[in-house]
Image (tube, grey):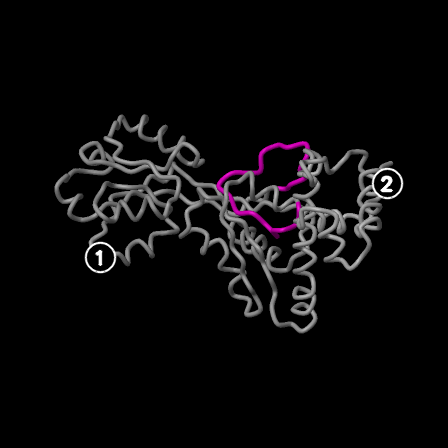
């Protein structure tokens, strides 16, 4: 069994790495250089690897030290957040929900998915957008409460993650009225006559859209591909081409003057997942999201 980490030793290592040397770290800590050096050596003995190497007249992190520093940064950043989080919980000033949003997820859908949590007056929402790999790493380190994605968490023996089905929505096609008026005809055949915008292959629904176009014998001219759905819709509204969007986005899209619904393709469905680092959900707002999802599916 590995020896437990002494977090005081880890803190001294972290300060040395931040300050770039033993002497500057000792000055910041108000300690003797020999004491700081001894604490760092104790940490190295616990981990079984050297964390620093000589570099000119100073020291630099080894490969093992770089990894240790990355983890130490996350640990002490969380520590800095602890007093505020405890104070808010104790005084009832807020209920923080940190959500990671996969960068391919339609932004208009995110608000729909999070709406049940927003109805709680105590909520203090923190939304961070990134690629799914970065978000899942932050989730595993408990820097996020949950991750929202258009696909379930990929299998990873190093991460214990749980995917919960949060909902699904069919797609519909939209186009500016000026573009739709120049290419009259029944849907979906009219798509063959106009430029279209599509999500990139990184977005889960792209493969299902390609299959639907193939089944419909449609080979439209693809004028653009976008990973960000909000950007895709913005270029579509500007007149660049017809574009697909979730039916959950319909009300917001119809607020745009001159935008027309071309038609629906109910057999092309976007799936949405809530990914957690715990099987048994404890956060009350996350429990609320899942309960509303289950009630809607019943």
* 157 in magenta: yes
Camera-side residue of 127 and 207:
127
Instruction: Name the residue tied to disc 2.
Output: 3
Q: Give residue 135's position: percent from left, percent from top.
A: 56, 44
Q: In which quarter of the image is residue 89?
A: bottom right
Placement of 240 over or under 296, stated as above or below: above
Q: Give residue 43's position: percent from left, percent from top.
A: 81, 42
Camera-side residue of 4 and 222:
4
Q: Quadrant of residue 61?
A: top right
Q: Give residue 109's position: percent from left, percent from top.
A: 43, 51
For mark 2, give the secondary structure.
loop
Q: Quadrant of residue 97?
A: bottom right
Q: Give residue 11's position: percent from left, percent from top.
A: 75, 51
Residue lying at 35% horizontally and 39% vertically, measured from the top left = 226
Q: In this picture, which residue range is highlighted in magenta?
A: 141-162
Q: Dividing the image into 4 quarters, which one contains the N terminus?
A: top right
- Of the numbered discs 1 and 2, the one sitting upstream in the chain is 2
For mark 1, give the secondary structure.
loop
Camera-side residue of 163 and 43:
43
Mark whose residue sits in front, 1 or 2: 2
Residue lying at 51% horizontally and 38% vertically, measured from the top left = 151
Instruction: Name the residue tied to disc 1.
Output: 257
Residue lying at 29% horizontally and 38% vertically, measured from the top left = 197
């Amino acid at each position: 069994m590995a020896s437990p980490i002494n977090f005081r030793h880890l803190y001294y290592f972290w300060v040395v790495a931040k300050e770039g040397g033993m002497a500057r770290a000792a000055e910041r800590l108000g300690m003797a250089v020999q004491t700081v050096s001894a604490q760092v050596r104790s940490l190295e003995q616990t981990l079984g690897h050297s964390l620093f190497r000589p570099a000119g007249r100073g020291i630099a992190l080894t490969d093992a030290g770089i990894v240790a520093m990355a983890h130490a940064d996350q640990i002490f950043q969380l520590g800095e957040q602890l007093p505020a989080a405890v104070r808010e919980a104790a005084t009832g000033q807020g209920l923080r929900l940190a959500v990671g949003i996969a960068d391919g997820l339609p932004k208009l859908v995110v608000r729909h998915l999070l709406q049940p949590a927003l109805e709680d007056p105590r909520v203090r929402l923190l939304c961070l957008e990134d690629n799914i790999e970065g978000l899942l790493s932050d989730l595993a380190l408990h820097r996020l409460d949950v991750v929202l994605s258009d696909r379930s968490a990929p299998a990873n023996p190093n991460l214990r993650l749980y995917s919960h089905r949060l909902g699904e929505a069919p797609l519909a096609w939209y186009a500016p009225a000026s573009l739709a008026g120049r290419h009259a005809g029944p849907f979906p055949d009219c798509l063959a006559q106009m430029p279209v915008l599509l999500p990139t292959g990184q977005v889960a629904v792209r493969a299902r859209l390609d299959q639907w176009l193939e089944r419909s014998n449609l080979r439209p001219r693809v004028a653009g591909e976008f990973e960000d759905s909000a950007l895709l819709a913005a270029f579509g509204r500007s007149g660049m081409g017809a574009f697909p969007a979730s039916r959950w986005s319909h009300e917001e899209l119809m607020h745009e003057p001159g935008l027309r619904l071309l038609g629906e393709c109910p057999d092309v469905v976007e799936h949405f997942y809530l990914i957690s680092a715990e099987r048994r959900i404890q956060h009350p707002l996350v429990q609320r999201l899942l309960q509303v999802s289950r009630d809607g599916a019943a």
